[in-house]
Amino acid sequence: FSSSLTMARRYDSSTTTFSPEGRLHQVEYAIEAINNAGTCVGILGNDGIVMASERRITSGLLAPAKTSEKTYKLCPHAACNVAGLTADANILIDQARLRAGRYHYQYQEPIPVEQLVEHVCNYKQSYTQYGGLRPFGVAFLFAGYDENHGFQLYQSDPSGNYSGWKATVIGANNQAGKSLLKSEYGSSSSSEMTDEEETSPDVAGALRLAVKVLNKTMDGTAAAAEKMELFTMKLDESGDVVHHILTQKEAQAVIDEVEAETASAGDS
Amino acid sequence: MDTVFGIQFKGGVVLAADQSNARSILVYQNNLDKVTKLSSHSAMGVSGPNADMVNFTEYIAKNLALYELANDGTKLSTKAQANFCRNELAVALRKGPYQVNLLLGGYDEKDDAGSLYFLDYLAALQKVPYGSQGYASNFCLSIMDKEYREGLTEADALLIIEHCIKEIATRFLINQPNFMIKIIDKDGVRVHSFGGDPADT
């Protein structure tokens, strides 16, 4: 491995060149960069989607944020969470918003979620093949609703690949987060059902699970409402999509519920 | 000169058009099909010069096919198809306009209902329960105004179409002996009847 690393040096400066082993090193380095970014968890519930992210406060002198650094609305029926270089992400978010708007202008209908994701990903991919520019150092979680497939959760990375998930984690300590999800998603602790078969949780259950995951990935720092951003996407009674970032109070309530759950689980 | 008209009924749409292809005093053919299938459950009745008619309908139909291929079989609703057409007409309008007037009809499984859209060469778009293009309007619209009601059956709608065709045969100066009638419902687009078989060379 070490020898291929030293050899890699000759092939890794240009994004558009394969290494002799058939790898695109720049793309891989970009993916690595995201492993240092604030964690984002996405969970698909049966009545909506939860995206929870780690808020990193880098300095006490920073002015309180008016807008989120993690969650962005792309159109009435889709939103995304960002892990990675915020400046890079802004470009891609603009692209996504434009695409959603143009689709709606052309068809007078909301863009199917996967088409929106694919558009952003194709844009990312072009930076791995043309122009000699570096890839975007951003990974996304996309949450959206459309009539064809209901609620959907997608993850994408700098390579331009994407896939649909029931639950996933990106950013720092994502492996720890993913292993927790593997054991806990669909089990009775996070959903109403007690069958052996895997069932998706409702949004309330998904929120609790997301907080659990963040607790694990933010291991070492105490769980606090200011350090987390909890976002939900649901339908209201008229069938319109509702985007909601939980208030401090609401987030604290979820954190308290999780604390109570883990405390009682320890007893039994 | 083309006669195109259509009516929405419960669970679908009927589209009808004359079959003459003529220019000035010469009739080229009497079995032209002016109601083109766009997708599995939609079709467009078109009026205008033959070149634009064919060019535009083929362009739209192939773009709709491309959409389905590119998006894993996702179908565009009739409304989305109509808006797509409108957009294409609008963009071309100030470059090289398509001189086509259309009636786009389709069936959507989601609502289990048909819908009919009126589009003209200036890129106007209006959802209508019934409509017509061309000189036919002078004769058909008043008949449809009088006889259309909500919840028509397919048979009812076809009666109205027949009534319109009779009126045109009686009162319209230009002789249009043959009509193509197509029905769009949950089973797709099918030919109900025609005067001249388009397959005859």
Image (cartoon, coloured by chain):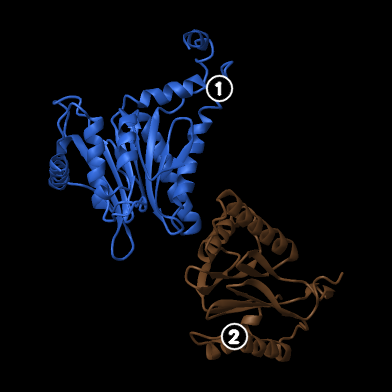
Chain colours: A blue, B brown
Quadrant housing residue A33: top left
Quadrant housing residue B161: bottom right
Indicate the amino acid at tag 2: Ala
Is A11 drawn above or below residue A154 in the view shown?
above
> Which residue corresponds to mark 1?
A16
Q: Answer left or right for B90 relative to A40.
A: right
Closer to the camera in the image, A241 or A20: A20
Residue A152 at what x, y percent from top left? 40, 49
**CA neighbours of label 2 inside 10 A, class few (<14), some (14 to 19), many (20+):** many
Residue located 12% across and 41% down the image: A267
Q: Are discs 2 and 1 less than 8 Å apart at CB?
A: no
> Which residue corresponds to mark 2?
B157
Q: Answer left or right for A145 relative to B173.
A: left
**Which quadrant is home to the C terminus of chain A?**
top left
Closer to the camera in the image, A99 or A161: A161
Residue B61 at what x, y percent from top left? 65, 59
Indicate the amino acid at tag 1: Thr
Closer to the camera in the image, B200 or B153: B153
Is A235 drawn above or below residue B46 in the view shown?
above
Residue A244 visible to an observer of this rendering: no
Q: Which mark is residue A3?
A: none
